[in-house]
Amino acid sequence: MIYLFKIGFLDVRWTDLVDILLVSILLYQVYKLLKGSVAVRVLLGFLSLYLIYLVVKAAQMNLLSNILGQFMGVGVLAAIILFSQEIRKFLLLLGKTTFREDGLLFRRREPKEAINITAIMEAIKSLSGSNTGALIVFSRNTELKFYADSGDLLEASISKRLLMSIFNKHSPLHDGAVIIFNGKVKAARCILPVSERENIPAQFGMRHRAALGMSEATDTLVLIISEETGQMSLARNGHLDNNLSAPEIRKRINSYLTEKETPEVEEPQTNLEVAS
């Protein structure tokens, strides 16, 4: 057996380095697939618990090691059940041109493009004036692949006519959310997680609940236009501001997109703050 070097009592081989590299690549690809969804928090919690189990086992703490070992045995089955959809998507992604330039390992990085705020504002003012319901998700640091894949991928340039046609009541794409990322309409008819909070006022329907749920699970800014009243609202970090004016909407979108660092997401408060 050929050893590369030795650290204390550990003999490191070439195969050990290759093993670590492959595991790192695998974990990174899984993280990219789950990024932007609440499932990534479950994955990080599971990995943290597994690391604790390894430390306890190495320290020969037999009782705690046996308890955690039993949990890890059941935890693998639980993880398969919890991440069944993500595992299926990962295997499908793995089967697609893994080593092509635009495949799993060698994905080209596209430069970020500026979002056409003017076209968005013109569209939402027209939608609000005609009481046409709309749900738009703005993302600045992730393409939200998990949620984009639940709808129809577009990768289209932003324009007033495009947004108006998507949310037209007779359009097959109007039922669901639009995701805007990197200066483009990435996807339409997307399914968002619905907030399970019990203190949401009765006047808010499924659009507002979906916007709150998305803002709780991801670092996004979600715009809602009510179909009943035409009022425009924004959801961020589990907070909902209702009945905002067009200048305030523009100001908050610009502020969100130009923030340098992602703020820490706070736990949703008990009382839902609604600005009138």
Image (spheres, grey):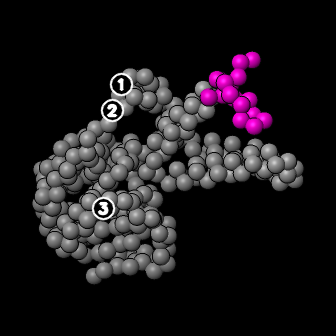
x then y, percent, for residue 193: 44, 57
Seen at 30% across and 45% down, the residue is 187
Q: Nearer the viewer, residue 273 or 171?
A: 273
**Residue at horizontal 35%, vertical 28%?**
102
Q: Distance between the residues labelled 1 and 2?
A: 7 Å
Q: Are marks 1 and 2 in contact (CB under 8 Å)?
A: yes
Q: What stretch is highlighted in magenta?
A: 1-17
Residue denoted by label 1: 101
In the displayed structure, 171 sits above or below 196; it is: above
Query: Which residue is drawn at the image coordinates 14% and 49% (left, top)?
Result: 159
Q: What element carries label 2?
A: loop
Q: Quick check: is 3 in the magenta stretch?
A: yes
On screen, residue 160 versus residue 34, left or right, reads: left
Residue identifier under label 3: 259
* Quarter location, residue 236: bottom left
Q: Which kind of residue does numbered mark 2 sit on? A: Arg
Q: What kind of residue is marked 3?
A: Glu
The x, y position of residue 61, in whole percent, is: 85, 51
Q: Name the residue under label 2.
A: 108
Q: Residue 240 carries which label?
A: none
Q: Crowding at label 1, few (<14), some or many (≥20) Cα neighbours within 10 Å? A: few
* Residue lying at 85% horizontally and 47% vertically, measured from the top left: 60
The answer to whether one can see residue 173 in this image is no
**Location of residue 207 in the rendering, given as x and y in whole percent from the top left corner:** 34, 63
The part of the image, by quadrant, that contains residue 112 is: top left
| Of pointers 2 and 3, the one earlier in the residue sequence | 2
Give the amino acid at mark 1: Glu
Q: Which of marks 1 and 2 is nearer the N terminus?
A: 1
Residue 131: say if magenta: no
Q: How crowded is mark 2: few (under 14 residues within 10 Å), some or many (20 or more)?
A: few
Q: Is residue 84 left or right of residue 131?
A: right
| Image quadrant in which you'd find residue 237 | bottom left
